[in-house]
Image (spheres, rainbow, N blue to C red):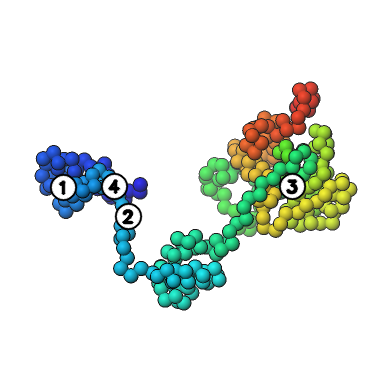
Amino acid sequence: MNIHKNARLTPIGRERMVRQVLSGQTLQAAAHAAGVCLRTVRKWVARHGTEGVAGLQDRSSRPDKLNRPTSQQTLDKIIELRRKRLTGKHIAHVTGVSAATVSRVLRRAGLSRIKDLEPREPERRYEYKNPGDMIHLDIKKFGKFDRPGHRVTGDRTGQSNPRARKQGGHGWEYMHVCVDDASRIAFTDIYRDEKKESAVAFLKAAVAYYQMLGVTINRVMTDNGGCYKSKLFAAACAQLGLRHIRTKPYTPRTNGKAERFIQSAIREWAYARTYQTSRQRAEHLPGWTHMYNWHRPHGGIKDKTPISRLGWKRDNLLRHHI
């Protein structure tokens, strides 16, 4: 229950006040003790007398019956006009009711926002059967730095954006990410850009990494970034024998496994500790990725580690584990 900060009485306080009156204390004394007026005491005593302790609870101030309720025909008209994408004020002008009434009706119908008129498609969760059937690629940009930033220290003193002050900046570095759809085994590396040459180099390195684990890659899924739409990337896929699948524009959930991995990396690696420089942060990425693959339980695969999904025997695990 949301109690006002200056409220004199809560349901417990009302019950205490009523019991004091019932035990013989005068209404005036009970009102003085509770810091309320005499009429308030009478109201709660009377409500307790007719409804018992349940009558001392808060209730809506909305009347049981409206004097001039909005007709059902008008309510239906408001919904109809909204589905034609009219604004609230436009609907109010057409129907002759107040904008507040239109807002209330639309909120009750769940149509306050334009995007509510087109409900989001239900999540379609999928998982390829075998490791290597599909890998997801994505890129996350991080700013370079030569001292800890406010994101981890909480101190913005002297950390105004250098670019805003026209003093240049340290630039950016890009974490390229690859996640296997079936096993969730990840491969990461830091590049200085997100151009097609870097994307191709990372793709080849990722395929080689999975081959080292005994996994053959068949498909690769990416978003519609320029580096992934380039002819150079298409040629690399053809050379490696990979089928390239691009996601539908503006639907990052299609590539959700890579997106989810990036969220974990941000929380558990990039901003999990105070790095003195961005170079130090980059040096910790391979170690964190190894932990993610070999030691971290993954909720999407029933709290198993990604490497366990390769079905290796003990000898294989010991040979590949570093």
- The kind of residue tagged 1 is Ala
Reading the image, the residue beneath label 1 is: 31
Q: Residue 287: x, y in percent?
A: 70, 33
Quadrant of the image occupied by residue 268: top right
Q: Could you tell which of marks 4 and 3 lies nearer the N-terminus?
A: 4
In the depicted structure, whether residue 89 falls above or below residue 253? below
Q: Which residue sits at x=18%, y=50%? A: 46
Q: Could you tell which of marks 1 and 3 lies nearer the N-terminus?
A: 1
Reading the image, the residue beneath label 2 is: 60
Q: Could you tell which of marks 1 and 4 lies nearer the N-terminus?
A: 1
- The kind of residue tagged 2 is Ser
Q: Could you tell which of marks 3 and 2 lies nearer the N-terminus?
A: 2
Reading the image, the residue beneath label 4 is: 57
In the depicted structure, whether residue 6 falls above or below residue 277? below
Cα–Cα span, label 1 and label 3: 69 Å
Cα–Cα span, label 4 and label 3: 56 Å
Helix or strand or loop: what does disc 2 sit on?
A: loop
Cα–Cα span, label 3 and label 2: 53 Å
Q: Nearer the viewer, mark 4 or mark 3?
A: 4
Q: Is residue 10 visible?
A: no
Q: Nearer the viewer, residue 94 or 294?
A: 94
Determine crowd level at label 2: few under 14, some 14-19, many 20+ residues with C-alpha closer than 10 A: few
Q: Residue furthest right?
A: 239
- Look at the image and tell me in which quarter the C terminus lies: top right
